[in-house]
């Protein structure tokens, strides 16, 4: 079962927590973890743009040195083609990781991969994803 950041020993290490009606976002040193709420149809204009604006304002970055972890603890959908809007705005990511153990999420990930410029890493646990951030992802840069 995928756990919320708030239910783990990662939570005390959060630099800033952003709470929206559609998501909770946790900013750490070098990576971001999002938890989109149940039933949301996550899009650039209605959701992602606000998160990206707040993160870039807080960290003063275009995101190219950050890893984004989507902790999919709830069922929701992503407008996958909106990744093109993200990149059109000159934003970037060092890596994109998805944490989920549902088959539907894995299928949705295949669609997202069509619009995301790099490989999307999949993990069954949040701890595995964070461990990868702290060890293996350093070699990707």
Image: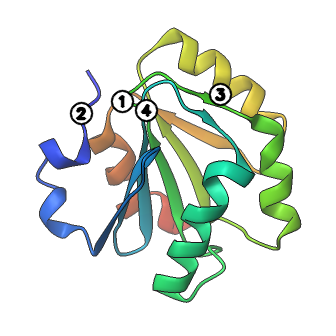
Disc 3: which residue: 109
Query: Which residue sits furthest front?
Result: 21
Is 75 situated left or right of 84 in this image?
left
Task: Return the disc, 2 or 4, that comes first in the chain's sequence.
Answer: 2
Disc 2: which residue: 3
Disc 1: which residue: 73
- CB under 8 Å between callouts 1 and 2? yes
Q: Is residue 58 above or below residue 95?
A: below
x, y percentage for residue 82?
80, 46
In whole angstroms, how far apart are the C-alphas of marks 2 and 4? 9 Å
Q: Quadrant of the N terminus?
A: top left
Q: Is residue 116 visible?
A: no
Disc 4: which residue: 72
Point 43% across, 61% down: residue:
32
Task: Return the disc, 1 or 2, that comes first in the chain's sequence.
Answer: 2
Task: Return the disc, 4 or 3, that comes first in the chain's sequence.
Answer: 4
């Amino acid at each position: 079962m995928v756990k919320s950041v708030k239910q783990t020993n990662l939570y005390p290490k959060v630099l800033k927590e952003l709470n929206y009606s559609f998501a909770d976002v946790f900013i750490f040193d070098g990576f971001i973890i999002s938890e989109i709420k149940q039933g949301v149809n996550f899009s650039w204009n209605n959701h992602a743009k606000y998160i990206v604006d707040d993160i870039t304002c807080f960290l003063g970055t275009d995101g190219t040195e950050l890893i984004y972890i989507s902790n999919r603890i709830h069922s929701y959908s992503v407008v996958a083609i909106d990744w093109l809007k993200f990149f059109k705005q000159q934003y970037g990511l060092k890596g994109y990781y998805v944490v989920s153990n549902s088959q539907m999420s894995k299928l949705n990930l295949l669609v997202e991969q069509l619009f995301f410029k790099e490989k999307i890493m999949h993990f069954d646990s949040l701890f595995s994803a964070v461990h990868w951030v702290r060890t293996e992802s350093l070699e990707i840069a």
